[in-house]
Image (cartoon, helix red, strand yellow):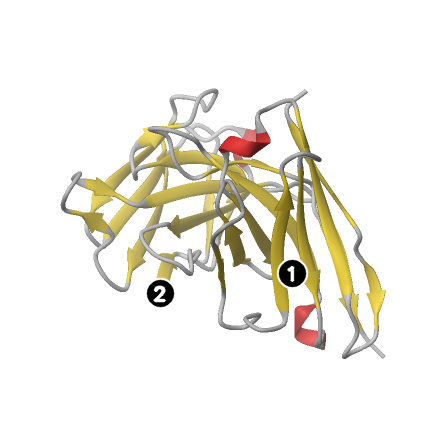
Amino acid sequence: EVQLAESGGGLVQPGGSLRLSCAASGFDFSFHWMHWVRQGPGKGLVWVSRINSDGSSTTYADSVKGRFTISRDNAKNTLYLQLSSLREEDTAVYYCARLAYGSRHGFDLWGHGTLVSVSS
Amino acid sequence: DIVMTQSPDSLAVSLGERATINCKSGQSILYNSNNKNYLAWYQQTPGQPPRLLIYWASTRESGVPERFSGSGSGTDFTLTISSLQAEDVAVYYCQQYYTTPYTFGQGTKLEIK
């Protein structure tokens, strides 16, 4: 089955760190650029970060630049997001999403998300 | 950053009637070299991740019912549901992927009247 499955979320104090993982299965993970998108409680979707297919290029939203790090291990079919210096406003469900390949576009496959709660 | 503004914020439509959601980008997202609008539409039902409906502003994703259509160019775009079904109750988002950050609209909540 083609799917993405996030893990690693949880409750963390302000200033703390977490590492999120996104396990890919059922497709050739190494072909696809991958993204992280988050959604605060009752809020809309916010793009967080992206990484190219071989991991050599990354981009971040200004709100997380210098605090979050995206990476991938194509041998393990896994995407990561290291979250550091967490703030209460980082509280959200974090989704990994696959960028469609070839002539298609958009985020055509999403995981079900992992909840990160930042609170003292 | 390219600001994406959707209207209305919420919408109630009778079953079988047409629903129209608008999305305006703060700058053109038409890439002249390939004449493509870098815009996608997503549907999110409660407790679920978003689902891609439309990309390139008007290309329907595989498996998406024909009642969903996208139109527009440059800065003004529309998602139309030609005949609303009960399963279409959701929040709909537009997104530009012309340049990072890949910004989303604030969402439009669609309900049954």
* Picture residue at 44% right of the left edge, 21% below the top: B62
Residue A82, position as x, y percentages in the image:
69, 60
Q: Quadrant of the N terminus of chain A?
A: top right
Q: What's under tag 2, amino acid-wise? A: Val
Q: Quadrant of residue B56?
A: top left
Looking at this view, is A119 or B69 the one in front? A119
Q: What residue sits right under mark 1 in the picture?
A: A42
Res. A106 mark = none
Does residue A89 lie above or below B51 as drawn? below
Neighbour class for label 1 at 10 Å: few (<14), some, many (≥20)? few
Tag 1 near tag 2, CB within 8 Å: no
Separation of disc 1 and disc 2 at Cα?
A: 20 Å
Q: Can residue A118 be seen from the camera position used here?
A: yes
Looking at this view, is B89 or A10 the one in front? A10
Q: What residue sits right under mark 2 in the picture?
A: B3
Chain of the residue that carries numbered disc 1 in the rendered image: A
Q: What's under tag 1, amino acid-wise? A: Gly
* Picture residue at 27% right of the left edge, 64% below the top: B26
* Label 1 SS: loop
Chain of the residue that carries numbered disc 2 in the rendered image: B
The total number of labels drawn is 2
* Picture residue at 58% right of the left edge, 52% below the top: A36
Taking the image as shown, residue A18 lies to the left or right of residue B28, namely right
Does residue B16 lie above or below A113 as drawn? above
Residue B36, position as x, y percentages in the image:
22, 40
Taking the image as shown, residue A7 lies to the left or right of residue A49, namely right
Q: Quadrant of residue A115?
A: bottom right
Residue A7, position as x, y percentages in the image:
78, 47
Residue A16, position as x, y percentages in the image:
79, 74
* Label 2 SS: loop
Q: Can residue B112 be seen from the camera position used here?
A: no
Looking at this view, is A97 or B84 the one in front? A97
